[in-house]
Amino acid sequence: MAASLKTSLQDQLDRITQNTRALVQPERLAFSEKAIAELFATGIEDRILKPGSEAPSFTLPDARTGKTVHSADLVALGPVVIKFFRGRWCPYCVTELENWREFGSGLRSRGALFVAISPQAPRQNVFMLDQHGLPFPLLTDAGCDVSEKFGLAYTLSPEQRRYYQSILVNIPFNNAGLNYHNATEASWRLPLPGIFVVDRNNIVTLAEAHADFRVRPEPADVFAALDALAR
């Protein structure tokens, strides 16, 4: 189904949650809820880069072209929407990016660029581009160095690592081509799924991210922020 600004992204994500609750064992659901609560309790949401802040500069590889993308070059062309996501293994991330796939004309009409950033390896980004027909750049932020500057990065606890292993999500492999026996701390890092709008002066005008990975910013709010820049 094609996405539109009249279709709530959160409604689509809530359906994923409802289906998961119907299919997944209660003890696994309980662990996921506990992990979300623990992440929230760290105060990570208070560390997210605030509107009015200068956006951190970054230089990251584009999976499709292999070329280096400089944030300064992006903002020189127009306002930039920066989307941080966890990886292709996350159904919420996939649904969110598939929604943004449909909004190219809305972005172009506002002179805006859209880039998506995750810690996953370039090869995984290429798989994601091909599988889901994504038209925008996917950039690799190895070790979550850039997402750390935006206040989003965290490291999975040993308990959480065992949980992901138990559900056959190999995060070190997805992020760095590593296996459990040789995984580094950096390969166990993830960002909060978040979105930022950065104007041509490199100032953040919208910032939203949540410790609960099931909650995502609505595209309509992003477009409202872009429209405000034009006024």
Image: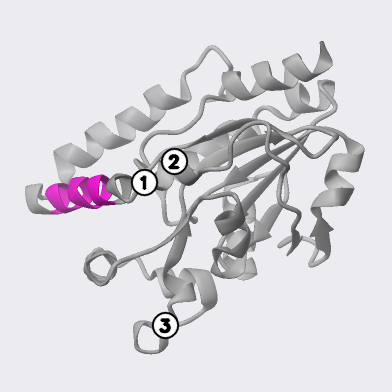
Q: On the image, numbered disc 2 is attached to which residue? A: 46
Vertical placement of residue 24 versus 7, above or below: below
Q: On the image, numbered disc 3 is attached to which residue? A: 183
Where is residue 67? Give x, y as percent: 83, 65
Kindly report which numbered mark, 1 or 3, lies closer to the viewer in this rendering. 1
Q: CA distance from mark 1 to mark 2?
A: 5 Å
- The answer to whether the residue labelled 1 contacts the one labelled 2, judged by CB atoms less than 8 Å apart, is yes
The quarter of the image holding the C terminus is top right
Magenta span? 28-38
Where is residue 74? Give x, y as percent: 84, 45
Asked whether 29 falls inside the magenta stretch, the response is: yes
The three-letter code of the residue at mark 3 reads Ala
Residue at 75%, 36% in the rendered image: 203
**Crowdedness near tag 3: few (<14), some (14–19) or many (≥20) residues, C-alpha within 10 Å:** some
Residue at 79%, 32% in the rendered image: 199
In the rendered structure, which disc, 1 or 3, sits on the residue that comes first in sequence?
1
The three-letter code of the residue at mark 1 reads Gly
Farthest residue, direction left? 26
